Image (cartoon, rainbow, N blue to C red):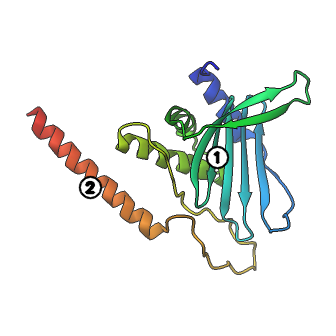
């Protein structure tokens, strides 16, 4: 499969950001789906629990697939279209290990998004954290990412439910992780500067 051009990728994300999300009814477990679909080859499917927390997201971007699941992390794959008719079906072929190039392409595609759609913003943050982890690791490595919890605003007059069961990391731990990343970056930067001098 050939890599799509950056222009095609940006166009697909632009169309995705303009797509009107379609919400499904709650399932037996209370989760509901929110689906964004663009005709340019981008699709974002989000699953949200009863408290409004994103539990799983699937991003398909021009034949490449990234899946984030709370408590599991990120996985990648490729999507194959079966059938030539309008009613063709998609089959996802998961990668054995996350493919860094797929993660990086998706992260770069979403990095310029500046809209307010909370589902697109959630996936943007997940992929940005994965990209940061790949850069810090210096190359390919399995990626487990805890994204910030994104909750829906409460309906008027309805008290907000307490947040519990934060996936993988709480904001406190994310703050400590970011401090650790900044500290390591500072040490590496000082070391490089001394080496250059």
Where does the C terminus fall, quadrant-wise? top left
Residue 183: which disc? 2
Residue at left offset 51%, top offset 32%: 101
Does residue 127 sit above or below 23 in this rendering? above
The mark total stands at 2
Q: Are marks 1 and 2 in contact (CB under 8 Å)?
A: no
Residue carrying label 1: 67
Other-residue count near label 1 (Cα within 10 Å), few / some / many at <14 / 14–19 / ≥20:
many
Q: Quarter of the image holding residue 18? A: top right
Residue 121 visible to the viewer: no
Q: Which residue is drawn at 71% across and 38% down?
A: 16
Residue 109's spot in the image, x, y percent? Answer: 57, 34
In the rendering, which numbered label is found on residue 6? none
Can I make out residue 30 in this image?
A: yes
- Residue 154 location, x and y as percent? 71, 72
Under circle 1, the secondary element is strand
| Residue 193 figure quarter | top left
Question: With respect to residue 150, does 79 lie above or below?
Answer: above
């Amino acid at each position: 499969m050939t890599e799509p051009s950056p222009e095609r990728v940006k166009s697909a994300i632009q169309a995705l950001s303009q797509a009107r999300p379609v919400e499904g009814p709650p399932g037996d477990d209370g989760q509901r789906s929110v689906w964004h679909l663009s005709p340019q080859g981008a699709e974002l499917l989000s699953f949200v629990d009863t408290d409004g927390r994103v539990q799983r997201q699937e991003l398909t971007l021009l034949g490449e697939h990234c899946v984030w699941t709370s408590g599991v992390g990120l996985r990648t794959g490729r999507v194959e279209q079966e059938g030539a008719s309008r009613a063709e079906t998609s089959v996802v072929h998961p990668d054995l290990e996350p493919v860094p190039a797929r993660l990086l392409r998706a992260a770069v595609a979403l990095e310029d998004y500046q809209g307010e759609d909370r589902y697109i913003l959630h996936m943007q943050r997940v992929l940005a954290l994965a990209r940061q982890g790949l850069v810090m690791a210096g190359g390919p490595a399995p990626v487990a990412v805890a994204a910030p919890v994104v909750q829906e605003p409460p309906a008027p007059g309805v008290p907000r439910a307490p947040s519990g069961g934060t996936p993988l990391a709480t904001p406190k731990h994310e703050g400590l992780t970011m401090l650790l990343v900044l500290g390591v970056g500072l040490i590496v930067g000082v070391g490089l500067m001394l080496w250059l001098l």
